[in-house]
Amino acid sequence: MRLKLNNKGQTLVEYVLIISLITVVAIAAVKILGGYLKDKITEVGCEIAGKSYVEGESAGEGYCEGEESKLLD
């Protein structure tokens, strides 16, 4: 007698594992590159507003000239 195997549950688990792995990689990439991305967006925003971009001490701390009062200590 041959048994018919049901692979639907296994396929669903594989898809969930793949989506979980992609999610973890995406979160790690944003954590690692997020500060640099924020600096580039701020720099473009400063140019659009006609202000000078001031580079911060580390990634993600850049700001537009004249907005020093908005920085958190």
Image: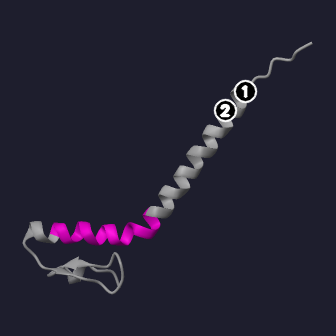
Instruction: Please tell me which residue is depicted at 32% across the width and 67% down the height of the picture.
Output: 37
The residue sitting at the top extreme is 1
Label at residue 11: 2
User: Horizontal and vertical percent for residue 54?
Assistant: 20, 82
Return the residue at label 1.
7
- For the residue pair 19 and 42, the one nearer the viewer reads as 19
Within-10-Å neighbours for mark 2: few <14, some 14–19, many 20+? few
Q: Are marks 2 and 1 in contact (CB under 8 Å)?
A: yes
Magenta residues, start to end: 30-45
Label at residue 56: none
Q: How many marks?
A: 2
Name the amino acid, label 1: Asn
User: Horizontal and vertical percent for residue 1?
Assistant: 92, 12
- 70 left or right of 19 in image: left
Name the amino acid, label 2: Thr
> Does residue 66 show up magenta in the picture?
no
The residue sitting at the left extreme is 50
Question: What kind of element bears circle 2?
Answer: helix
**Distance from label 2 to label 1 (Cα)?**
6 Å
Instruction: Please tell me which residue is depicted at 34% across the width and 75% down the height of the picture.
Output: 60
The residue sitting at the right extreme is 1
Q: Quadrant of residue 58?
A: bottom left
